[in-house]
Image: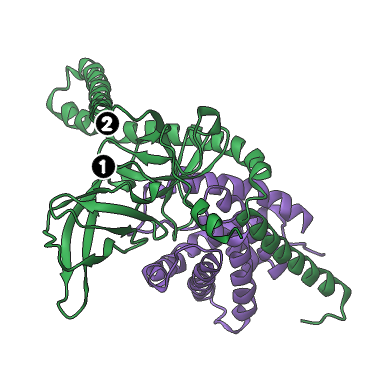
Amino acid sequence: MNLNNAPQRIRWGVIALLIGIAIFLSILDNSGNLDNALAFLRNPLIAILDWTSARTDTLADALSGPRDLQEAKTEIERLQERLDALERENEELRESQGEAQLLFDLFNRARQAPELTRVTANVIGQDTNPAIRSIIIDKGSEDGILVGMPVESARGLVGRVFRTAAKSSQVVLITDSASAIPTRLGTSRATGILRGGGLGGSMAIDWLDLKYQVEIGEVVSTSGLGGKFPQGIVIGRVIEVERREAELFQRAIVQPAVDTESLEIVFVITDFQPIETDIFSDTTETP
Amino acid sequence: MRTSFYLAVPIMMLLSITQSAIIARYPLLGFVPQLSFLVALSWGLLHDVEEGVTWAFVGGFFIDLFSVTPTGVTPFVWMIAILVVIQLSQIFPTSRYIMPTISGALGTLLYIAMQVLLLRLFGYQSSLETVIALLPLSILHGILILPVYWLMYTLLQRIRPRRVSF
């Protein structure tokens, strides 16, 4: 690196400038000062992402469809044209059946807890950072989505809205390592904080009192403590209990009820008001 | 650099959309390759460190738009990783297969470690386990960089053909 040379100086100056901009941006964004500016950039990109996601679905369906057709070709040559039509119809019906089943599940979920108002959203993308577990949905602030709203699917809790744009939102999944949810176990009634395992890790409830006899297979649901999630949303099941008598606490490994990799449609619970617990700390600080 | 910047913007924008909408659905061996990073690194290796850093800035910026990480973290870690790797590449074997492979793997390792550290600094729950769990991604990147490097080489030849003097 010879800084006496003018082009070299300019080159390293550009590099230093870009690094400086990146640091400045991350500090500004982390403090929430860039939300509006970034939303301006993010909105058109999310529209393209939505379009791409829909086309990918169509293409994936088209590629997975013709297998039956190939088998039919070899079996009944003369019925080829009719078979094509029937096959297409069959695929459409199968897709409709899948959608109907999904909507039926969602309807059932809505019926189980009718007191909560929900907005249905399509999953249009996943987090581009391999260390983070989050999804992008096609509903945003224009649809009444606010930061902190709980998100669930027909099978159970999915996560929490982290950031909103006009027409989209980012949802941090329960499996992300930053996730911490107050939970209650179904049979033993033990309560604890469920932490996401992040990449390659398992979700686990640490610090469970040894007085509770936690069993494998127990249903884990939200306890409602802390006021961030409504009570009683299913999260998963206990698949392993680490109980060491020498220690004062036990640990339960939890398998999520929701397959976060294959989510298509989710519910955002819009009328649940998360309780802001910060007010308590403010009160103590007030002279 | 200016021409390259204008080329980087549409390419990196398309790659980040592809990354979120398509590639993320079809992980390779359980990992989602970071194509934008491989493209930026390949471009830098084929051209120079300034170009690589510029492409990393643009690519990382678009990647952060589709992520919950604070915008700026990914460009920062990518730029540093590419800067270090390109400087070190002078001591790597000059083979067109070995040099990109080592660079891809080492660069990935560097950026993942720095990203986890930075995310912790910003209050995210990233841990050493995340770095360990992502280690195979560096091997995957070491392999996947070869076709990307070749493609970038072809692109570079097209847009900046070598001058021939008679």
Question: Which hue is chain B drawn in?
Answer: purple
Q: Residue at x 40, y 47 (%)?
A: A228
Check the image and name the residue furthest to the bottom: B91
Residue A207 percent across, percent down from the top left: 27, 67
Q: Is residue A244 above or below residue A51?
A: below
* Local SS, label 1: loop
Residue B130 lies, in percent from the top left, at 40, 68
Q: Which chain's residue wears label 1?
A: A
Q: Chain of mark 2?
A: A
Callout 2 secondary element: loop
Q: Residue at x 31, y 37 (%)?
A: A153
Mark yes or no: residue A279 visible. yes
Relative depth, front residue between B108 and B68: B68
| Crowd rating for badge 1 (residues with CA inside 10 Å; few <14, some 14–19, many 20+) | some
Task: Give the mark nearest the N terminus, 2 or 1.
Answer: 2
- Horizontal side of residue A254 vs A43, given as left or right: left
Task: Locate residue A89, reporting x and y percent.
Answer: 25, 18
Q: What colour do you see for chain A?
A: green
Q: Is the Cβ of the residue at disc 2 closer than 8 Å to that at disc 1?
A: yes
Viewport quadrant of the N terminus of chain A? bottom right
Report the number of discs: 2
Q: How far across and how far down the image is residue A73, in percent?
A: 19, 27
| Residue holding disc 2 | A113
Asked whether B34 or A206 is in front, the reply is A206
Q: Which numbered circle lies on residue B27?
A: none
Identify residue for label 1.
Answer: A232
Looking at numbered disc 2 in the image, what kind of residue is underneath it? Ala
Disc 2 crowd, CA 10 A, few/some/many (<14, 14-19, 20+):
few
Q: Amino acid at mark 1?
A: Gly
Displayed quadrant of residue A240: bottom left
Would you say A12 lies left or right of A257 here?
right
Q: Are marks 2 and 1 on the same chain?
A: yes
